[in-house]
């Protein structure tokens, strides 16, 4: 549905990563990953919140149910966090290798 059925130009290319249904099923939080920067994320979130009544009606029709939970949308930043963690772990490994090389070179120095 995010891929072309919503005509709001604020909605950047994005996809649903997770849906968390509240106990009782009256509300659901939809996590969305957005391709783009912070501004695209904000614009997409605003567009989705504007279109949520339409999205609910489409879900009701497609699923053939009487009740569809109230929807709220949130940006999923897990991919960005994963990338940042990978970067930090890479730096740590590089530092450890340099430290190990320094120790080895100190041990291998001939005694005066």
Image (spheres, rainbow, N blue to C red):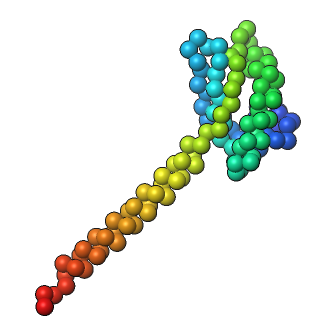
Which quarter of the picture shows residue 77?
Answer: top right
Image spot of residue 21 (x, y percent): 59, 20
Which quarter of the picture shows residue 41?
Answer: top right
Image spot of residue 18 (x, y percent): 60, 31
Q: Residue at left 43%, top 57%?
A: 89
Residue 29 versus residue 43 in the image, above or below = above
Image spot of residue 61 (x, y percent): 78, 16
Which quarter of the picture shows residue 9?
Answer: top right
- Pick the quarter of the image with the C terminus: bottom left
Q: Residue at left 80%, top 22%?
A: 53
Q: Residue at left 65%, top 18%?
A: 27
Q: In the shown orientation, is residue 84 left or right of residue 19?
A: left
Residue 98 versus residue 37 in the image, above or below = below
Q: Residue at left 54%, top 47%?
A: 81
Residue 14 versus residue 91 in the image, above or below = above
Say how many tags the image has. Answer: 0
The residue most toward the bottom is 112
The answer to whether residue 32 of the structure is visible from this angle is yes
The answer to whether residue 58 of the structure is visible from this angle is no
Image spot of residue 30 (x, y percent): 65, 29
The residue most toward the left is 111
In this view, the residue in front, 87 or 4, is 87
Residue 58 versus residue 106 in the image, above or below = above
- Pick the quarter of the image with the N terminus: top right
């Amino acid at each position: 549905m995010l891929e072309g059925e919503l005509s709001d130009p604020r909605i950047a290319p994005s996809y649903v990563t997770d849906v968390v249904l509240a106990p009782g099923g009256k509300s659901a939080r939809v996590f969305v990953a957005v391709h783009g920067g912070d501004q695209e994320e904000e614009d997409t979130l605003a567009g989705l919140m504007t279109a949520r009544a339409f999205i609910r009606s489409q879900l009701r029709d497609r699923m053939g149910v009487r009740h569809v939970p109230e929807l709220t949308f949130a940006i999923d930043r897990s991919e960005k966090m994963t990338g940042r963690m990978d970067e930090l772990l890479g730096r740590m490994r590089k530092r450890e290798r340099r430290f190990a090389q320094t120790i080895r070179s100190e041990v291998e120095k001939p005694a005066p």
